[in-house]
Amino acid sequence: MPAETTPQWVFSEDDRSFMRQALAQAEEAAAGGDVPIGAVVVDATGNVVAAAGNRRERDQDPTAHAELLALREAARRLGSWRLLGCRLYVTVEPCPMCAAACVLARLAQVVYGAPDPKLGFVGSLANLLEDPRLNHKVAWRAGLLADEASALLSRFFANQRSRR
């Protein structure tokens, strides 16, 4: 999304707290050798119902993205695949697979930190959450603690390159 059209969202202390929890999940993922992306699902009353970090390397599963793992756990805990009223906080802009899962889960909102210009599907390459052809739209906000999320990714990939 070009800078001149990027909205300036207001984030609350609760928003920051939830994103810090997602960042902690991302750090755990990095410690396990996975790309540091973390996600937290918060229910309509403001309670965290699930949290996860990427586990693709650990599980050798191409779909073990933080968002999907957190959505699955939230659905299990809430007893429904319909996560109505729930918000997803994720450190990096969701990819097409994860953005589609957010729509299918009927989330109320996605809040992400850093954009992903190569694979992001919530504003960068496209926006699946607002696609008018789909039967559910998901509100979204971007940029929450983006510098911290970007720094975590940068450190991780610098470490990966130094090992080669």
Image (tube, rainbow, N blue to C red):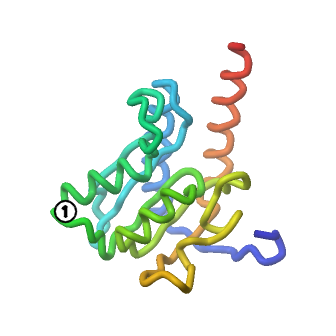
Q: Secondary structure at mark 1?
A: helix
Query: Which quadrant is home to the C terminus?
Result: top right
Question: Is 68 on the left-hand or right-hand side of 49?
Answer: right
Would you say 58 lies left or right of 113 here? left
Residue lying farthest to the top in this orientation: 163
Residue positioned 52% across, 64% down in the render: 111
Which x, y percent locates residue 80? 20, 66
Q: Amino acid at mark 1?
A: Leu
**Horizontal and vertical percent for residue 67?**
43, 52
Q: Residues within 10 Å of mark 1 (few under 14, many from 20)?
A: some
Residue nearest the viewer, comparing 16 with 122: 122
Q: Quadrant of residue 44?
A: bottom left
Q: Position of residue 122 (x, y in %)?
A: 60, 66
In the picture as drawn, the residue positioned furthest to the left comes out as 79
- Badge 1 is on which residue? 78
The residue at the point 68 percent across, 30 percent down is 157
For image coordinates 70% across by 35% down, the residue present is: 154
137 and 140: which one is in front?
A: 137
Q: Please state which of residues 36 and 8 is positioned toward the viewer in this rendering.
A: 36
Name the quarter where the N terminus is drawn.
bottom right
